[in-house]
Image (cartoon, rainbow, N blue to C red):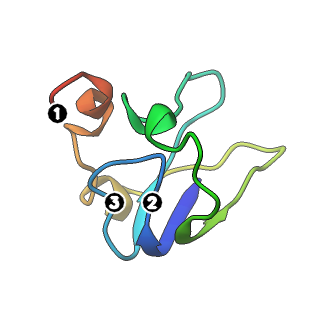
Amino acid sequence: MLYYVEGDFMSRKGMDYASITLHPGGIPHGPHPGKAEASIGAEETDEYAVMIDTFKPMYVTEEAMRLDDPSYPYSWLEGK
C-alpha cells in the first residue's frame, strides 16, 4: 500500500494529495509509461509518500471499496 502525502510523484501520473494505491501480492506494477525514462538524470524528487509492505495480507473494507477508482488498473496504458 502506498499513501501519497504531497509533491510531484515521479513514478505515477494523476496522484493527488492523500491518494492511496494498493497492489496485492503477485500483481505486477511499476512506474507509469514514460515516467522511468523521465527520471533519468534527475538529482532529486519533490515527493513524500509512505509505503507499507506487510507479511500478512491486508483486507479492503466495504467503505474503502466505495472509494475505488475502477479506471486505475488501466492507467498503465499509453495515453491514459
Amino acid type, callout 2? Phe
Which residue occupies 25% across, 28% down? 74
Q: Secondary structure at mark 2?
A: loop
Q: Quadrant of residue 67?
A: bottom left
Q: Quadrant of the C terminus?
A: top left
**Residue to which mark 3 is pinned:** 15
Residue 13 location (% of width, % of height): 31, 49
Which residue occupies 40% across, 47% down? 12
In front here: 9 or 24? 9
Q: Residue furthest right?
A: 55
In-image side of 13 versus 43 (left or right): left
Q: Secondary structure at mark 1?
A: loop
In-image side of 53 versus 69 (left or right): right
**Residue to which mark 1 is pinned:** 80
Residue 60 location (% of width, % of height): 48, 52
State the CA–CA distance, disc 3 to disc 1. Answer: 13 Å
Amino acid type, callout 1? Lys
